[in-house]
């Protein structure tokens, strides 16, 4: 166990108007960043979510074709709760999440082209 004291976080600059929050799966932002995102949307900032998958493989015992749309709908509903109205999903509805990562070059290129549309 580490005996180091955790470093105090510095205040984050909030002098901006638009941001993209990127996460791997639906619900990742809700568990880690949603309270900050709610603060920012309350300030009038525009936040867009970019989810790299639809969470197709995230429910044990449920086929990815069923789980993906369910988790997608949950993500959109969760985003609305914190003032986010634009949720982009990087994968197609028929793709499984593991197919996204076949090539780092392809992933990078897709990220750049997707981010330019936001
Ligand atoms: Zn996750």
Image (cartoon, rainbow, N blue to C red):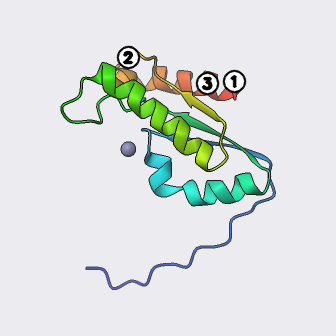
Determine if residue 52 is in view.
no
Q: Nearer the viewer, residue 43 or 7?
A: 43
The answer to whether marks 3 and 1 mark residues whose Cβ atoms lie closer than 8 Å is yes
Residue that mark 2 sits on:
95
The quadrant of the image that shows the C terminus is top right
Furthest toward the left, the residue is 61
- Circle 1 is placed at which residue position? 117
Q: Is 118 left, or right, of 3 in this rendering? A: right
Distance Cα–Cα, label 3 vs label 1:
5 Å
Q: Where in the figure is residue 69, as x and y percent of width and height?
A: 41, 25
Q: Is residue 39 depicted above or below 75 in this figure?
A: below
Q: Give the image location of residue 90, x and y in percent.
A: 51, 25
The span from disc 2 to disc 3 (Cα, nearest Å) is 17 Å
**Helix, strand, or loop for circle 1?**
helix
Q: First in sequence: mark 1 or mark 2?
A: 2
Q: In front here: 27 or 97? A: 27
Residue bearing mark 3: 114
| Pair 2/3: label in front | 2
**Residue 10, image quadrant:** bottom right
């Amino acid at each position: 166990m580490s005996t180091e004291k955790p470093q105090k976080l510095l205040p984050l600059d909030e002098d901006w108007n638009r941001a993209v929050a990127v996460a791997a799966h639906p619900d990742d932002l809700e568990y880690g960043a949603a309270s900050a995102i709610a603060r920012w949307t309350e300030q009038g900032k525009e936040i867009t979510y970019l989810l790299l998958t639809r969470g197709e493989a995230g429910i044990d015992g449920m086929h990815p074709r069923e789980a993906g749309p369910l988790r997608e709908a949950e993500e959109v509903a969760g985003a609305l709760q914190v003032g986010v109205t634009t949720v982009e999903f990087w994968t197609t509805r028929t793709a499984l999440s593991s197919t996204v990562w076949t090539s780092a070059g392809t992933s990078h290129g897709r990220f750049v082209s997707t981010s330019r549309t936001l």
